[in-house]
Amino acid sequence: MAFNRILTNICSDDLPRSRDFYVELLGFEVKFDSDWYVQLQSPAHPEIEFGIINRTSELVPSGFQERPTGMYVTFVVPDVDAVFEVAQRMQLPILQEPKNEFYGQRRFLITDPNGCLLDICSPWGEGG
């Protein structure tokens, strides 16, 4: 089996707020912006995309229109501490400050405006 593309989409109650959150925090560029869906992409790697869909869109089955639980999205960035500084400037609630983990990643944890848990990390040491 081969894939042409894998795309993560999250659900949102407020597309503009979610879009602005990811653009400001992680530097995404807006590829597509509508009242039902926003497509973001990495400016350095356009093949890396992230979607945000209106939670109550007819395209989202009703049983999946709740806030997320039991999952999180990881963003591997070049400098986790620089992104942490941006998060602090944005006055985001921090669930875990940057910490070197046993598996070779330095990470911090926050939630996005939709309640999605985000793991922002960078490799450190030999394990990363």
Image: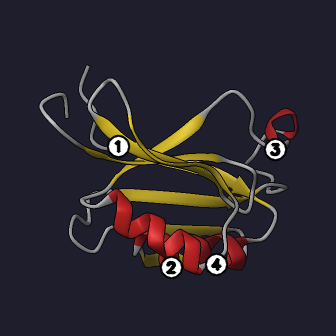
Residue 41 in the image: x percent, y percent?
A: 37, 67
Q: Nearer the viewer, residue 13 or 33?
A: 13
Which numbered mark, 2 or 4, is in the foreground of this view? 2
For label 4, the crowd category at 10 Å Cα-Cα, with few meaning under 14, some 14 to 19 and many 20 or more, is few
Q: Nearer the viewer, mark 1 or mark 4?
A: 1
Q: Residue at x 41, y 67 (%)?
A: 83
| Residue at 80% from the left image edge and 52% from the top image edge | 58
Where is mark 1, residue-wise? 106
In terms of sequence position, does the residue under pointer 2 or pointer 4 come before the other?
2
Quadrant assignment, res 53: bottom right
Q: Tell me the distance, in whole angstroms, between the alpha carbons under discs 4 and 3.
A: 21 Å
Q: Is residue 19 shown above or below 123?
A: below
Q: CA distance from mark 3 to mark 1?
A: 27 Å
Task: Say which residue label 4 marks.
Answer: 34
Question: Disc 1 on helix, strand or loop?
Answer: strand
Q: Earlier in the sequence, mark 1 or mark 4?
A: 4
Give the quarter of the image for residue 114.
bottom right
Q: Which residue type does callout 2 highlight?
A: Glu
Nearer mark to the viewer, of 2 and 3: 2
Residue 88 position (above or below residue 119): below
Query: In the structure shown, which secondary structural element does the residue marked by tag 3 occupy?
Result: loop
Q: Is residue 71 above or below residue 83?
A: above
* Mark 3 Cα-neighbour bin, 10 Å: few <14, some 14–19, many ≥20: few
Q: Earlier in the sequence, mark 3 or mark 1?
A: 3
Colour scheme employed for the rendering of this structure = secondary structure
Where residue 123 sits: x, y (%)? 24, 42
Q: Which mark is residue 67?
A: 3
Q: CA distance from mark 2 to mark 4?
A: 19 Å
Q: Position of residue 104 (x, y in %)?
A: 26, 31
